[in-house]
Amino acid sequence: MSTNQKNDLLRQGSILAIAGILVRLIGILYRIPMSNLLGDAGNGIYSVAYGIYSVTLTLASSSLPLAVSKLIAQRSIRKQHRNAFFLFRVALIFSLIIGAAAALFLFFGADFLEGLYAREGLARPLRIVAPTVLVMSALGIFRGFFQGKNTMVPTAVSQLLEQIVNALVSIVAISWMMHAFEESEDQSAYGAAGGIMGTLAGALTALIFLLFIFSVCRPHLYRQIRHDTHGSTETIRDILKALMITVIPVILSQTVYQIGFTLDDLLFGNLMDAKGIDNNIISSLQGVFNSQYNILINAPVAVATAMASSTIPSISASTAAGDWREIRRKVRGVIKFNMAVAIPAAVGLAVLARPILTLLFPSLTEYRDLATNLLVYGSSAVVFFALSTITSAVLQSVNQMRTPVVHGAISLALHVLILYFLLKYTDLGIYALIIGNVSFPIVICALNWRSVGIALSYRQEVQKTFIIPLISSAIMGLIAWGVYSLLFSWTEKNTLSVVIAVVAAVLVYGFCLLRFYCFTRQELYDLPFGGRIVRLAQRMRLLP
């Protein structure tokens, strides 16, 4: 591969990585006003409906973009443009058939799923979100097509459009629904249905955008086909076989995580209902767990994973070149950076749990103590989810595709057993979900850690990866809590106190990392804004 090709690949990958980070941040931020508008019961219904939709989408089509992009790229590189376009058409028809079947299942099976999950009002949002599976099936094929042609801009822009429209429509629709049905006993269900409308609107917007781009590019694509001297050499059977071989491992890997979350909803709803707990209380408890707790836990995990995953393509390239020394260097760096983000995030969420919840969720009153406890006890999940996700990606990048799937399945089986026992035979209630939420990624981490060591003859450096970030985070946590307590006692203004405490925490943590020489000069250069960090550290005499 030439230098220009490598630079273009890096540039295209960076575009998609930046878009991924922005999409995750928008997704996290708009859920905060959504949660405040829906209330605890509405959040519970929405989160269960969205979980079912996510599993259905994963099984139906979410892995097809990766398969299509890979297969089209292989044919485009060999200048087999006729075969590439034929593959695109077959994949589109195939995905529409599967997507339509999944959409019909959600629409006509909504009442059955409502009874299965013991959640009154669940059928309404499920029927509204059902067509989204069909739209996303088509959308995924178009994204895979453009990525296979080595242009990430259409996918990146469509992802941003999808999330922005999703956020705006969700908030407006929830506000309208909650107001229009404020006298109804089913207000929470209507609110959840409004929230899920944004998912459909965002997907439709992204699809319309990509259809427009495709129509603009169509003359160029037809010229490529006319000048293709290879002809059409593949059958529908060949293409479907290639799709299945590529798709199945990805489906299994993604489904383990999605099923884990929706099984939590299923077990919790049914076992709490069997104990005679009121349906509204069950929905409210699930709303607190899936909204206030999960939103804050997923924020640092999403950012850390998106930023660290930008190095995964380079690990794959080193694997193809057989440069194992370089692979080990990159793996060591990506895990260290991941932990340098996740550990302080977990400590910060635990230390400032109540002030942060008060700032972000002012409508949370009745269950604020519960949400605070969940965040304090469950914040360590940030570290384990970040580590399990990145180690799974590392294994896949060194051609260990099946290993994370097996590990996820083992962890899921243990998770279900632990959660069932705790919900059935103890009075832990919602706290059982916290135990399951932490134990699930811990098992994956342990199994992945062993496999990475064997596959790469590798051992992670411990002191600078875990111990120094943990000590620095402890110092940061003490300072943050002290600053917040002092300011709040003087001003009684929570927002001002939280903002200043967070700024102080970031500065203290950054100083500690540099002072304890957690990163080498080269590792700092590899970080976002690394050059500025190095220059600042030099002025402060914090680099050896």
Image (tube, rainbow, N blue to C red):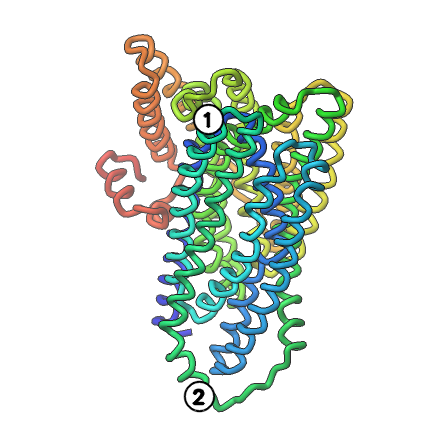
| Amino acid type at image mark 1 | Leu
Q: Is residue 99 left or right of residue 473?
A: right
Foreground mark, 1 or 2, reads 2
- Above or below, 102 against 347 in this view is below
Q: Mark 1 and 2 residues: CB-CB less than 8 Å, in contact?
A: no
Q: Pick whichever, 293 or 486, lies toward us.
A: 293
Residue 231 in the image: state x and y as whole percent. Answer: 53, 89
Image position, residue 445 (x, y; %): 61, 41
Which residue is depicted at the point 38% across and 46% down?
A: 164
Residue highlighted by disc 2: 226
Q: Is residue 449 shown to the viewer in this render?
A: no
The local crowd at label 2, few if under 14, some if 14 to 19, many if 20 or more residues have their Cα within 10 Å, is few
- Residue ranking furthest to the top: 489
Q: Quadrant of residue 9?
A: bottom left
Tally of numbered discs: 2
The reply to whether residue 299 is in sight is yes
Q: Residue drawn 60% across and 43% down?
A: 126
Foreground residue among 175 and 159: 175
Please indicate whether residue 91 sits to the left or right of residue 173 in the image: right
Residue found at x 47% / y 59%:
313
Name the residue rendered at 49%, 72% in the picture.
Answer: 73
Around disc 1, counting alpha carbons within 10 Å, would you say few (fewer than 14), some (14 to 19), or many (20 or more)? many
- Nearer to me, 368 or 126: 126
The image shows residue 79 at horizontal and vertical percentages of: 47, 82
Q: Tell me the number on the disc at residue 349.
A: 1
Position in image of residue 430 (x %, y %): 63, 24
Work out whether 130 lies above or below 66: above
